[in-house]
Amino acid sequence: MGRWTYYAPLWLGTLLAAGLYGANLAQLPPWPVWVHVVAIVVGAPLVGLGLQLGLIGAQGAFAQVLPVPWGRSIRGGGAVLAGSLLLVWFALGLICALLRSEGLVVAALVVGALALASLVAAVIVYVWHLPAAVRDFGSEG
């Protein structure tokens, strides 16, 4: 898998979110121009980043491998746990957005807090397993 395909959720999600925002601009309230610019410049890459983290979570949960910078990867149970927590964060984040869009503020706050807790737990598990990351490619011995 090359860099273009591995990072496809990041750049495709960013482009898709920006395109959908622009296409539905007429249905949004009349906000100042700077709000729309910030929504596209900041919001669209955040959507792409969320999709990329969802892919990394699926990779950890199902392939039992999480990438680490400098040609290493976390393998085994740590990757499964961190990946599963990322997938829980992703799902709860979507549920939180849906609840908020329906006006259920308290429920959205509770689910959002659970999503944030699972994201923090995923980061803690990832950092905890960093020293055990193995080299992916290179000479052994």
Image (cartoon, helix red, strand yellow):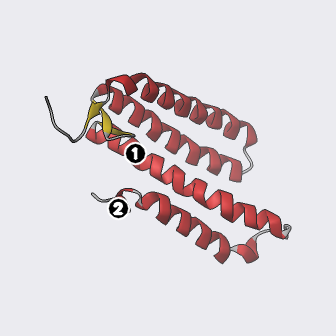
Number of the label disc, if any, that sits on residue 5:
2
Residue hosting label 1: 56
Compared across the picture, whether 122 is left or right of 58 comes to: right
Neighbor class of circle 2 (other Cα within 10 Å; few <14, some 14-19, many 20+) is: few
Residue 136 image offset from top left, x and y in percent: 24, 39
- What residue appears at the point 59 percent right and 53 percent down from the top-left corner? 46
Amino acid identity at mark 1: Ile
The structure residue drawn at horizontal position 45% and vertical position 47%, both measured from the top left corner, is 54
- What residue is drawn where x is 66% and y is 33%? 110
Task: Give the vertical position of 39 relative to 114 (above or below).
Answer: below
Quick check: 46 left or right of 125?
Answer: right
Relative to 4, residue 119 above or below: above
Callout 1 crowding tier (Cα within 10 Å): few <14, some 14–19, many ≥20 = many
Image check: 8 left or right of 43?
Answer: left
Task: Identify residue type, mark 2.
Answer: Thr
Residue 132: name its quadrant: top left
Tell me the SS state at disc 1: helix
For the N terminus, the image quarter is bottom left
Q: Position of residue 120 (x, y in %)?
A: 55, 29
Among numbered discs 2 and 1, the one appearing first in the sequence: 2
From the image, which quarter does the C terminus lie in? top left
Residue 107 found in image quarter: top right
Q: Quadrant of residue 24?
A: bottom right
Image coordinates of residue 22 in percent, x first then y, are 66, 74
Q: Which mark is residue 84?
A: none
